[in-house]
């Protein structure tokens, strides 16, 4: 069974969707949930589900991303993951870290890439008057939010939507999309998933 490590920075709702799906359908094993923020809410949720957790605070490392990543990679590699899932992990990664997990690192991003890489995706979709929004799971490559797309889910933008209401609608789809992509990815299938 493939071993999966998950990196988070916050509440970890995507992490929970992944862990629940893996453990219910027995296609992969969650071996680690790690965060750059020791106070990330998702860590306690993972621990409550019996998943090993770790945190490496990025702040003491200041601008030294490589030192932070070396400490993080040490925790990750100790659990020997086959696949690394970024799930709301909000640190930019250096090319060195990306190379280390090349071909086995996934990310979920709250827009229909290639539209709106980076931050504030929902505000940008609303400001542009887009009729639809969504989320993307992609392979992580050196260019930010630009790796091969492994799945997308679409939602309508509704009249009166705010950033929060749109984010909530997209997040619901993130929880369906990420497990659906992981199920395929563990078998070596990179055919993009399309939801709904
Ligand atoms: C999710 O919406 C995810 O797509 C986004 O952060 C949120 C994390 O929520 N990720 C990014 O913006 C990555 N650049 P969660 O902690 O509840 O999964």
Image (cartoon, rainbow, N blue to C red):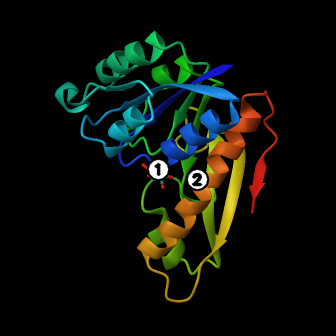
Q: Earlier in the sequence, mark 1 or mark 2?
A: 1
Rendered view: 163 above or below 64: below
Task: Measuring from the top left, give residue 103's x and y in whole percent.
Answer: 66, 25
Q: Is residue 112 above or below residue 133?
A: above
Of residue 93 and residue 80, the one placed in the foreground of this image is: 80
Indicate the position of residue 125 as horizontal and vertical percent values: 54, 71
Q: Quadrant of the N terminus?
A: top right
| CB within 8 Å, label 1 to label 2 | yes
- Give 174 or 151, whichever is nearer the viewer: 174
Secondary structure of residue under mark 2: helix
| Secondary structure under the numbered disc 1 in the rendered image | helix
Q: Residue at x 73, y 33 (%)?
A: 185
- Along the line of sight, the residue nearer the viewer: 147 or 134: 134
* Above or below, comparing residue 19 to residue 75 in the picture: below
In percent of the image, x 78 and y 27: which residue is there? 188
Mark 2 Cα shell of 10 Å, populated few (<14), some (14-19), many (≥20): some
């Amino acid at each position: 069974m493939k071993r999966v490590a998950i990196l988070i920075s916050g509440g970890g709702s995507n992490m929970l969707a992944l862990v629940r799906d893996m453990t219910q359908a027995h296609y992969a094993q969650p071996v680690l949930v790690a965060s750059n923020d020791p106070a990330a809410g998702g860590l306690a949720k993972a621990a409550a589900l019996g998943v090993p957790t770790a945190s490496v605070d990025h702040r003491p490392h200041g601008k030294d991303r490589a030192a932070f990543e070396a400490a993080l990679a040490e925790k990750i590699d100790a659990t020997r993951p086959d696949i690394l899932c970024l799930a709301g992990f909000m640190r930019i990664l250096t090319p060195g870290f990306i190379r280390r997990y090349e071909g086995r690192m996934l990310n979920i991003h709250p827009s229909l890439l290639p539209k709106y890489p980076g931050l504030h995706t929902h505000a940008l979709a609303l400001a542009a008057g887009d009729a639809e929004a969504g989320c993307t799971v992609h392979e992580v490559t050196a260019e930010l939010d630009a790796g091969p797309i492994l799945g997308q889910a679409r939602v309508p933008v509704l009249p009166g939507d705010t950033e929060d209401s749109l984010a909530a609608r997209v997040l619901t789809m993130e929880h369906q999309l990420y497990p659906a992509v992981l199920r395929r990815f563990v078998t070596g299938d990179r055919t993009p998933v399309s939801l709904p």
